[in-house]
Image: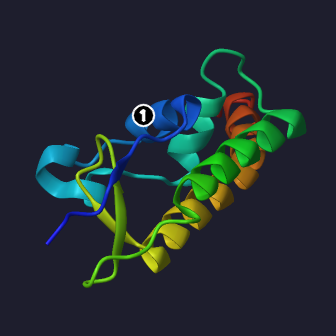
Amino acid sequence: MPTPPEITLPERLKHLVESCEKSCVASCCGIDAFDFSPLHVASYLSAYTNRISLGDVAEWEQELTKAEELVRDLTPDAEGFLCSFAGMNQLFTRETFADFIEELRHSIRVSPQILDLSEHLRNRPTLN
């Protein structure tokens, strides 16, 4: 039985995903090794500029669309698996892929708020 194709994520998205490998390593735990929470996504998106603009969010949304286009025309195998992504050690069904993209989309969309809250907490006067 042929295995589902291994797809390479768009370069920028690949680096974001790699930065979220926090809980373990993908070669051991697959997708469970990754933490795609808004905290980690916001940290990655703001690492070099200390900001996340609406334009940045729109650019990342385009990266997600590119990933969706990579699998759009794929046909699931007999077990329902659609593909895997290089470096993730995870097979995706159409449903689990959609869940993965939606989790990233949510974290990207709320990342400006996470950064704003972090800055607010950083600038809060300390109590002595």
Residue visible at 47% across and 75% down? 94
Residue visible at 67% across and 30% down? 122
Q: Secondary structure at mark 1?
A: helix
Can residue 19 be seen here?
yes
Residue 1 sits above or below residue 16 on the image: below
Q: Which quadrant is the N terminus positioned in?
A: bottom left
Percent position of residue 14, x then y: 47, 36
Can residue 128 be seen here?
no
Residue 57 sits above or below residue 34 on the image: above
Residue, far top: 48
Percent position of residue 92, x then y: 36, 67
Percent position of residue 35, x then y: 40, 52
Residue, far front: 1
Q: How packed is label 1: few (under 14 Cα within 10 Å), some, or many (20 or more)? A: some
Quickly name the residue at label 1: 19
Residue 125's quadrant in the figure? top right
For this rendering, which residue is in front, 116 or 34? Answer: 34
